């Protein structure tokens, strides 16, 4: 009798999930990092102590619950709940890993495209994986060069209030647009919009994206872009163009990006350039990349560069091990770092090694 009751309860619980097409997926990624900075800027009160460090650091682990409901009127209602968790946390970021900390939205997908609303990556960030996938395919956060404090794709971000539209695919062409609702006061509207597109086939990718943050400013003396709403008509904008070619087991990506900080009185631009090559042999994958940020206009010695070498070995269709080496070189008025979270002083450089494992589910 007890077995019959248990089976009845299980069937009742599972029935709604079966009809709603709920999927649970995710990725567990962690690595041992070895960080070796030089001693530039190391003093009492500096951002770091200059010591070498060996630590276990998570590399963007996440869990994703998603669902699709086929509507009577046609098309699909799509929802996603994705959350961050950490396997190793030397930078004490666990407090930010709340439920729904990553892309969490609801939307409608039909013949005329995909519209969604919620917390998610903006179009400037999303487009890049289809513009230059070889460069975007960095293997882990320790060597990651993409983000607002890194050297490339600097206005790509995840925000809490985003309206997003993606067109259907037209013979390989796709366009994306997003609007990020920002802080609004009586004197300013610090909202941001992004738009761009790409075309790809089996061999080539090419595309561009643009972002404009109105009534916002950011200190041009900082390598990290931290927008602040202002009332003086300032803006932060970015334009990125790139391409990619894949031939047999080889890949090559190129990108140019320009970020413009305008405080309402003067506009200051900074250019970044990137090139990356990849090669796949059986279960081995190799990636070599070089990224350079030039000086900010009016601020000498404010650039940096980063070279990275990475390799991975596929243990199965879902699991792999990898090893990476990166060298970040900052000019005396720059403090770029990698996605891993290690803070560098102005002018400080660092060697970063990591060996890790990743499994997807």
Image: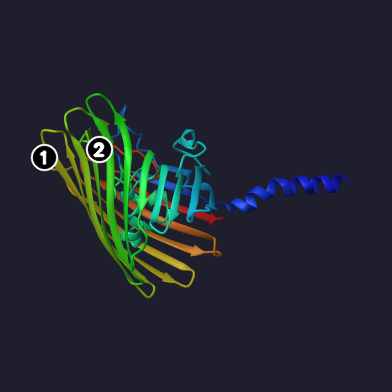
> On the image, numbered disc 2 is attached to which residue?
346
Mark-to-mark CA distance, 1 and 2: 17 Å
Residue linked to disc 1: 298
Category of crowding for the residue at label 1, using alpha-carbon neighbours closer than 10 angstroms: few (below 14), some (14–19), many (at least 20):
few
Q: Is residue 159 visible?
A: no
Q: Residue, x 50% and y 45% (percent of image)?
A: 82
**Mark 2 crowd level (few <14, some 14–19, many ≥20, 10 Å Cα):** many
Task: Note whether 72 is above or below 346 in the view shown.
Answer: below
The location of residue 83, given as percent across then percent down, is 50, 42
Residue at position x 26%, y 38% in the image: 40
Residue toward you, 90 or 257: 257
Q: Is residue 355 above or below residue 222?
A: below
User: Which mark, by number, is residue 27?
Assistant: none
Q: Is residue 348 left or right of residue 202?
A: left
- Residues 222 and 158: in front is 158
Residue extending furthest toward the right: 1
The answer to whether residue 267 is seen in the rendering is yes
Camera-nearest residue between 44 and 236? 236
Label whose residue precedes the other's in the sequence (1 or 2): 1
Horizontal and vertical percent position of residue 179? 31, 43
Q: Residue furthest top?
A: 186
Q: Tell me if 301 is positioned left or right of 353 in this view.
A: left
| Corner quadrant of residue 246 | bottom left
Residue 164's spot in the image, x, y percent? 36, 47
**Which residue, as the protein is rendered here, is positioned at the far bottom?**
248
Left or right, residue 130 beside residue 6: left
In the rendered image, which quarter is residue 47 located in?
top left
For the residue labelled by badge 2, is the local secondary structure a helix, a strand or a loop?
loop
Provide the secondary structure element on which disc 1 rests: loop
């Amino acid at each position: 009798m007890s077995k019959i009751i248990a089976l009845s309860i299980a069937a009742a619980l599972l029935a709604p999930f079966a009809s709603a097409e709920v999927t649970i997926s995710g990725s567990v990624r962690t690595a041992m990092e070895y960080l070796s900075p030089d001693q530039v800027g190391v003093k009492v009160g500096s951002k770091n102590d200059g010591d070498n460090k060996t630590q276990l650091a998570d590399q963007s682990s996440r869990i994703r619950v998603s669902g699709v409901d086929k509507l009577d009127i046609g098309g699909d209602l799509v929802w996603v709940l994705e959350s961050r968790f950490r396997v190793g946390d030397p930078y004490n970021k666990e407090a930010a890993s709340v439920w729904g900390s990553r892309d969490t939205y609801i939307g409608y997908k039909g013949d005329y495209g995909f519209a969604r609303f919620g917390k998610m990556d903006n179009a400037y960030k999303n487009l890049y994986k289809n513009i230059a996938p070889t460069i975007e395919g960095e293997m882990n956060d320790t060597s990651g060069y993409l983000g607002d404090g890194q050297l490339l794709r600097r206005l790509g971000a995840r925000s809490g209030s985003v309206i997003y539209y993606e067109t259907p695919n037209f013979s390989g062409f796709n366009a994306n647009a997003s609007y990020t609702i920002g802080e609004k006061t009586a004197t300013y509207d610090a909202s941001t919009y992004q738009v761009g597109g790409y075309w790809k086939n089996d061999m080539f990718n090419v595309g561009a994206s643009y972002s404009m943050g109105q009534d916002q400013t950011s200190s041009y003396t900082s390598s990290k872009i931290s927008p602040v709403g202002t009332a003086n008509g300032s803006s932060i904008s970015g334009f990125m163009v790139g391409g990619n070619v894949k031939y047999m087991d080889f890949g090559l990506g190129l990108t140019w990006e320009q970020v413009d900080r305008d405080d309402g009185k003067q506009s200051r631009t900074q250019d970044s350039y990137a090139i990356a090559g990849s090669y796949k042999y059986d279960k081995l994958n190799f990636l070599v990349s070089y990224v350079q940020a030039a000086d900010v206009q009016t601020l000498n010695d404010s650039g940096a560069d980063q070279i990275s070498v990475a390799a991975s070995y596929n243990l199965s269709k879902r699991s792999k091990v990898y090893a990476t080496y990166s060298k970040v070189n900052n000019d005396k008025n720059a403090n770029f770092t990698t996605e891993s979270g290690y803070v560098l002083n102005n002018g400080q450089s660092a060697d970063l090694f990591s060996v890790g494992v990743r499994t997807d589910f």
